Amino acid sequence: MPEAGFSQLLPDQYLITPSCRHDGIQTFLKHFDSALAAGIELVRLRPGALSEANLLTLFSACQALCDDHDATLLIGAELQVLLHQPVCGLHLNSQHLRQYGQRPADVGLLSASCHNGDEIDLAARLGVDFIVVSPVLATPSHPACSPMGWQGLGKLIRRAPMPVFALGGMSAADLPTVKQLGGQGVAAIRGLWPACVS
C-alpha cells in the first residue's frame, strides 16, 4: 500500500498507448516520444498482437525513451511473462486482479483496472499503488459499455484507499472535474496520444 502523500508523487495524466502494428513500430515510437516530450510522465504500453521479437524491440525502445524523459513505463501482466525480467511498472486488468493472491515481486509501481467496488477491494488487498476506474464517459473504444458518469466515479473514488485515475472518454480538459471529485487525474488513449492511431 502506498504511503501517505504518495499521490503527490504521481502525475495527473496517465497515457495508455494505442496498439502497435508490426509495420508501424517506428511511427508508434515517434508518437510515443512526442507524448513524453509534451510532458507525459506515466504511460502504459499496449503493444497489440506483436511477435515476441517485435515486442522485445518495442519494449526496449519505449523503456529507453521513458528513461530519457524521466517517465515511468508500465506493462500488462501478460507481457511481463514474455519479457522474463523485472519491470518498472505492472498493470493488472480485472481478470489478473482476481488471479493474484499477493503483490507481484520485482515490480515498481503496481496499478489495476477497476470497474466496481468489489474490484477496488481486491486491489486494496493486493496493495496496488493506484487504480484506473472506467468507463466514466462514453468512449469509441468500448461502445457497448455503459458509462458510470461523474456520480458513479465519485462514489468509487470515495471508496478507494489509493489514488484513482478516471478512464473512458477522458482528456486533459476533464482534469478539474476529476480532481474536484477527489481523483488523482485522467487516463486516456485518444485524449492524450499525439495523434489518433487505431
Image (tube, rainbow, N blue to C red):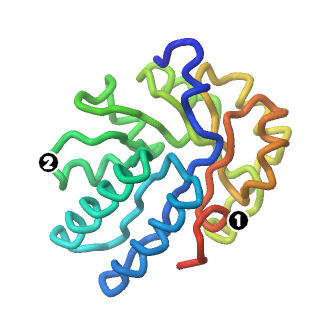
Q: Nearer the viewer, residue 14 or 103?
A: 14
Residue 176: % across, % down: 83, 42
Name which residue lies at 39% across and 48% down: 73
Q: Earlier in the sequence, mark 2 or mark 1?
A: 2
Residue 83: % across, % down: 18, 53
Q: Is residue 103 left or right of residue 194?
A: left
Q: Is residue 62 left or right of residue 97?
A: left
Q: Amino acid at mark 1?
A: Thr
Seen in the picture, residue 37 relative to 119 is either above or below; the reply is below
Residue 80: % across, % down: 25, 48
The quarter of the displayed image where residue 193 is located = bottom right
* Location of mark 1 (residue): 139
Q: Residues within 10 Å of mark 1 (few under 14, many from 20)?
A: some
Q: Amino acid at mark 2?
A: His
Q: Nearer the viewer, residue 45 or 134?
A: 45
Q: Nearer the viewer, mark 2 or mark 1?
A: 2
Q: Which mark is residue 84?
A: 2
Q: Answer whether residue 97 is visible to the viewer in this image.
A: yes
Name which residue lies at 77% across and 29% down: 182
Seen in the picture, residue 150 relative to 145 is either above or below; the reply is above
Seen in the picture, residue 159 relative to 95 is either above or below; the reply is above
Per the image, label 2 sits on a secondary structure element best described as: loop
